[in-house]
Image (cartoon, helix red, strand yellow):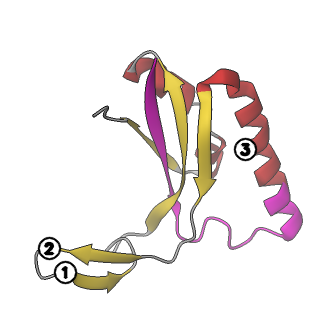
Amino acid sequence: MNKYMLILFESDNAYDDFSPEDMQKEIEVHGQWIQELGDRYDSGEPLHPEAKTIRGKDKVVTDGPFIEAKELVGGFYLINAESLDEATEIAKGCPILRLGGKVEVREIMKF
């Protein structure tokens, strides 16, 4: 079984209209999905939107993970799957898709 990272992209204002109750409900939806993944689930964490990016040999530091994008990486999940196709099918159940988000599926390299 291989390990895959599901990188969650969402609008930078995806949760602006959420009440604390809405946010709690969203967290519960993710928790339920994690339960449904069973042994396929490895780990996952949400990420703060603030970031710094360091570019190139001159190590130029800029604010944010992007230049002019309206979406950001909101979190990730690590899952176990037999293939990229299977990981992709599993990723289709990610709750973030309900909010118009995007999930990138990438296999973790083994060294």
Q: Residue at x 56, y 26 (%)?
A: 90
At label 3, counting other C-alpha atoms closer than 10 Å, the crowd grade (few under 14, some 14-19, many 20 or more) is some
Q: Which residue is mark 1?
A: 59
Q: Which residue is mark 2?
A: 56
Q: CA distance from mark 2 to mark 3?
A: 36 Å
* Kind of residue at disc 1: Lys
57 with respect to 86 (left or right): left
Seen from the viewer's position, the closer of residues 111 and 83 is 111
Q: Which residue is mark 3?
A: 30
Label 2–label 3 contact, CB within 8 A: no
Residue 50 vertical placement versus 109 (above, below): below
Q: Residue at x 79, y 62 (%)?
A: 23
- Residue 18: within the magenta? yes
Image quadrant of residue 39?
top right
* Kind of residue at disc 2: Gly
- Residue 98: within the magenta? no
Q: Looking at the picture, how far across and down is residue 67, in whole percent? A: 30, 76
Q: Looking at the picture, how far across and down is residue 95, in whole percent? A: 66, 42
28 with respect to 39 (left or right): right
1 with respect to 44 (left or right): left
Part of the protein shown in magenta? 1-24
At label 1, counting other C-alpha atoms closer than 10 Å, the crowd grade (few under 14, some 14-19, many 20 or more) is few
Q: Which corner quadrant holds the C terminus?
A: top left
Helix, strand or loop at disc 1? loop
Label 2–label 1 contact, CB within 8 A: yes
Q: Nearer the viewer, mark 2 or mark 3?
A: 2
